Image: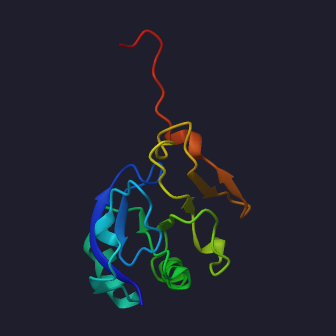
Amino acid sequence: MLRYINTDIVFQEFPDEVTLAINISGCPCRCPGCHSQFLWANRGDELTAEALSVLIHGAKDTITCVGFMGGDGDPAAVDLLAKYVQERHHGLKVGWYTGRTAISPLIDQQHFDYIKVGPYLRHLGGLDSPRTNQRMYHRCTDGSFEDITSRFWKHQSEGSL
């Protein structure tokens, strides 16, 4: 059973999207340097299709994407909810942040528009660092996935201080 702690409307997690980010608890990854250790415990409200619809309807005039932040303990449940969003909330994109090093075989990648994989490793940095081990993938119109990680890298302009 998936549980979530909170939600937020965010602008930078998925490119060109205004995202309803849902912070899923019960994360088994325990990444050193994790900025969301409050998500390690399996607590919060149950994230069912009905609860998800309520969250989406509360933000429907604002969002273009639903982002599942975590869910590594039950990727099959994340997949079911992603499929639900696709089928019931047409026009919304779906993204998933997983701390695992590979995309789970328990999901159908076609249920997602974006998938970020990789644990946070402090010495390599997050998605904004060219040294990162994390990868962000975007589903293309032909169903294949493209690595768009470099779109997140911070670039310094020549001559900047």
Q: Which colour scheme is used?
A: rainbow
The x and y percentages for residue 38 are 28, 68
Tell which of 60 and 145 is nearer to you: 145
- In the picture shown, does residue 105 fall above or below 114? below
Which residue is at the far top? 159
Q: Which residue is drawn at 36% across and 65% down?
A: 21
Tell which of 51 and 61 is nearer to you: 51
The x and y percentages for residue 116 are 54, 59
Tell which of 6 and 32 is nearer to you: 32
Q: Which residue is drawn at 57% across and 69% down?
A: 112
The x and y percentages for residue 153 are 50, 36
Q: Tally the numbered discs.
A: 0
Is 39 on the left-hand or right-hand side of 100?
left
- In the picture shown, does residue 46 fall above or below 85? below
- In the picture shown, does residue 109 fall above or below 120? below
The x and y percentages for residue 157 are 46, 18
